[in-house]
Amino acid sequence: MGEMTGSGRLVLLGAPLGNPADASARLRDVLGAADVVAAEDTRRLSRLARDLDVTIPGRIVSYFEGNEERRTPELVEMLAAGQLVALVTDGGMPSVSDPGYRLVRAALDAGVPVTAAPGPSAVTTALALSGLPCDRFCFEGFLPRASGARRSRLRALATEERTLVLFEAPHRVAAALAALADAFGADRPAALCRELTKTYEEVLRRPLGELARWATESDPRGEITLVVAGAPAAPATRPDDDALRAAVAEREAAGLSRRDAITAVASALNLRRRDVYTVVHQM
């Protein structure tokens, strides 16, 4: 279905990470129908339009980190006037470590509908290719540039059990990987994903220590996404013998048989039933 103009809507466009063939039909439709297209880089947008053989009849304006604060009220005025505004970044979804959040928040505060033509995402693409668990993950964007702030942030993340996804600039990736190896351990599994969907796509699946050495020696270029395995689950702390006996006695007092009480305590504390039985019958 094509996009109708004059509806006073903000549409977030998921742009290809590198390969134009990943562009959706809806992205083409919106680019061809929008009254205004706000682009992180207008030159890259023009190149994408040429690659897609799409003509953009609407007004093209720049919208990047340096002018977000000034440009946002202007775009909200256009939205309030009933115009269809499309927001596109250099690659992936707007707002994900890219311009967009400020405009989305301002449009919502102004009562303007916000929707998306979803598309590629470096976060989920790298996660899927990493070979690391994908069922639970967290996205940390870019680490702090200052070494002290970066160390503090990584110390706070060292016990995070979910798979971690990070963006990093190529000239900082060696230092970032060294800091990750220092904070998480050199043996922590990880993946470095470079130039996703592009001609020289590369995914290196190695422990953090090896990736840090590789980055130092290789001077990698291009867009880089790091995926790091979560911390191993902390072993359960076994209560002392008196606490185990008290837990069983409490369940017995509630009406369970001793057998069932022992089974319930063992299950609740992730212990072997035989071990709980032994403790209880040492009395």
Image (cartoon, rainbow, N blue to C red):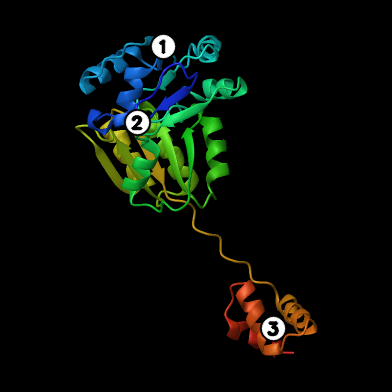
Location of the N terminus (image quadrant): top left
Left/right placement of residue 85 relative to residue 204 reads right
The crowding category of the residue bearing disc 2, from other C-alpha atoms within 10 Å (few below 14, some 14 to 19, many at least 20), is: few
Location of the C terminus (image quadrant): bottom right
Tag 1: amino acid: Ser
- Label 2 residue SS: loop
Q: Are marks 3 and 2 in contact (CB under 8 Å)?
A: no
Tag 2: amino acid: Met
Disc marking residue 261? 3
Q: Can you give x and y, in whole percent of width and height, for residue 26 in the image?
A: 33, 29
Q: Residue at x 22, y 17 (%)?
A: 50
Name the foreground residue: 55 vs 119.
55
The span from disc 3 to disc 2 (Cα, nearest Å) is 61 Å
Q: Can you give x and y, in whole percent of width and height, for residue 68 in the image?
A: 51, 14
Disc marking residue 113? none
Q: Residue at x 50, y 18 (%)?
A: 8
Question: Quadrant of the rendered structure where residue 61 is?
Answer: top left
Q: Is residue 265 visible?
A: yes
Q: Nearer the viewer, mark 2 or mark 1?
A: 2
Q: Which residue is mark 2?
A: 1
Name the foreground residue: 256 vs 265.
256
For marks 3 and 2, the one nearer the N-term is 2
* Vertical order, 95 against 129 (above or below): above
The span from disc 2 to disc 1 (Cα, nearest Å) is 27 Å
* Vertical order, 124 against 91 (above or below): below
Q: Nearer the viewer, mark 3 or mark 1?
A: 1
Q: Which residue sits furthest right?
A: 253
